[in-house]
Image: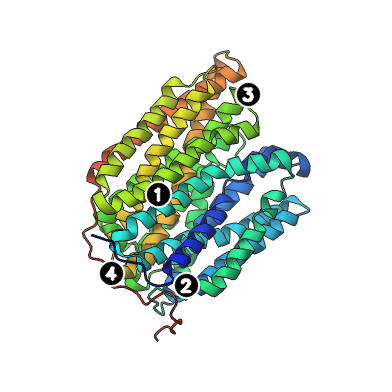
Amino acid sequence: LLAPPLPPGSGRLLFLLVAAAFVVILNETIMSVALPTLMAEFSVTAATAQWLTTGFMLTMAVVIPFTGWLLTRLPLRAVFVLAMSTFLAGTVLAGVAPVFPLLIAGRVVQATGTALMMPLLMTTVMNVVPLARRGTTMGLISVVISVAPAAGPTVGGVILEHLTWRWMFGTVAPIALAALVAGSLWVRDVTERRQVPLDVASGLLSAAGFAALVFGLSSIGEAAAGNAPLPPALPIAVGAVLLAVFAVRQLRLGDGALLDLRVLARPGYTVPLAVLLVGMMALFGTLILLPIYLQSVLGWDAQATGLALLPGGLVMAALGYLAGRAYDRVGPRPLVLPGAALAAAGLWGYALLLGPTTTAGLVVGLHVTLSAGLALLFGPLMTSALGALDRPQYPHGSALLSTLQQVSAATGTAVFITLLTVGTAAGLDAGAGQAEATMRGVHTAFLTGAAIFLAAVAGTLWVRRPAAPDAPAPAPADTPETPAAG
């Protein structure tokens, strides 16, 4: 049977949102290869320069929980314009920043706009796309959330090889401006809006809790090297306590919650989400660890390192889209089971086969294997998780998923870097040279990561196609916006 068509104008709307989301999320990792250059230009330490990435993740974790409330309260066009105009302002500020604090400020403003895009995109898909087409569309979104961060170092490396670091922002600003103009003309309201008051106490608990947690996780690696400003256990504990209080308050508020945590009571949402988060830990841990191995052990330069990650990113993009199309026909299990097996094979290959004389072909091959496995996981897992919810829960389910992705990315980075640091220190204490000690740390990190990923392999056995009926079709995307009730 043919899948039902999209409402008029929805294809153009979805294309715009996917393209805009790819551009803004690409910036999360694009600066990673430029840190040495920025350290020299602004005379800052590595710990200070790292805030270009850490500050981005912190801001994302703080802002995303508010998107569920925003998407419930405001028209879709208003949220899109807010997201893209904020991102554009941050891009311009970062690109012309004469001093490092202004560069950090630009990244924070950028991250605020980025944080709004993914929940906005996923909520729109769940409201506009018929059930029979959601797998294909969510496959495109999986490309955005996985390939965009993976492509960041590649794009950054190429730009830095031929231009200055300011062009990392200069090339993005015109694209963001074009998306903002197009969105102000094309985007129409397709969501159900309710006049939900903002609970200020929940907002403060959420912002402080997620900020403390992500900061603590991000500083674990620095603590292992003896450079952290305070013990990471302190902000992690504070964040955990604040988030526990936040969770209790959300459950008590019910329909008036800032972030409706009742979605976690549905196993059809929680199980795929848990597997997805373990996969995100593996992706971001690999993205931080593999360049260190290639440059510190094999002696590659930044551009060669970025290009080595490109084949895996291309495979993830192509296979993510195909997996989405296949989901609409066969459901999640025939995709996530082999996907988890492939990703596990890639991680175990890193743990057991990498060495000081490993060939480029083997490095790229293992990365392609890992990327192919994750591509079969991400789209089907997101579709299954959000498809298990009722329509009014889509904004909150999308916001929670996006928030926990940031936490899992920070966790994966922290775990891999900490194990790398500890393993390297043990190697140096045993009398090994720097490259050999680094190799020992790389081996320790990948071995532990591969073992942890076995939990994701087991979790795929409980992933099922959502049983929830399709939501009623919304008004066509090109109809005039209607005012919110109440």
Q: Amino acid at mark 3?
A: Gly
The x, y position of residue 409, in whole percent, is 47, 45
Asked which secondary structure carries label 1, the reply is: helix
Disc number for residue 79 = none
Spatial distance from mark 2 to mark 3, Cα to Cα?
A: 48 Å
Q: Residues within 10 Å of mark 4 (few under 14, many from 20)?
A: some
Nearer-N-terminus badge (2/1): 2
Residue under circle 4?
Answer: 471
Asked which secondary structure carries label 2, the reply is: helix
Q: Is residue 286 visible?
A: yes
Disc number for residue 321 = 1
| Above or below for 434 versus 274 | above
Asked which secondary structure carries label 3, the reply is: loop
The x, y position of residue 479, in whole percent, is 43, 80
Residue under circle 2?
Answer: 76
Spatial distance from mark 1 to mark 3, Cα to Cα?
A: 34 Å
Q: Amino acid at mark 1?
A: Tyr
Residues at discs 4 and 3 in contact (Cβ within 8 Å): no
Look at the image and tell me in which quarter the N terminus lies: bottom left
* Residue at the (50%, 24%) spot, across then down: 361
Nearer-N-terminus badge (4/3): 3
Q: Amino acid at mark 4?
A: Ala
Q: Is residue 38 left or right of residue 239?
A: right
What is the count of numbered marks? Answer: 4
The x, y position of residue 192, in whole percent, is 37, 75
* Residue at the (33%, 59%) spot, across then down: 134
Residue under circle 3?
Answer: 299
Nearer-N-terminus badge (2/3): 2
Q: Is residue 414 visible?
A: no
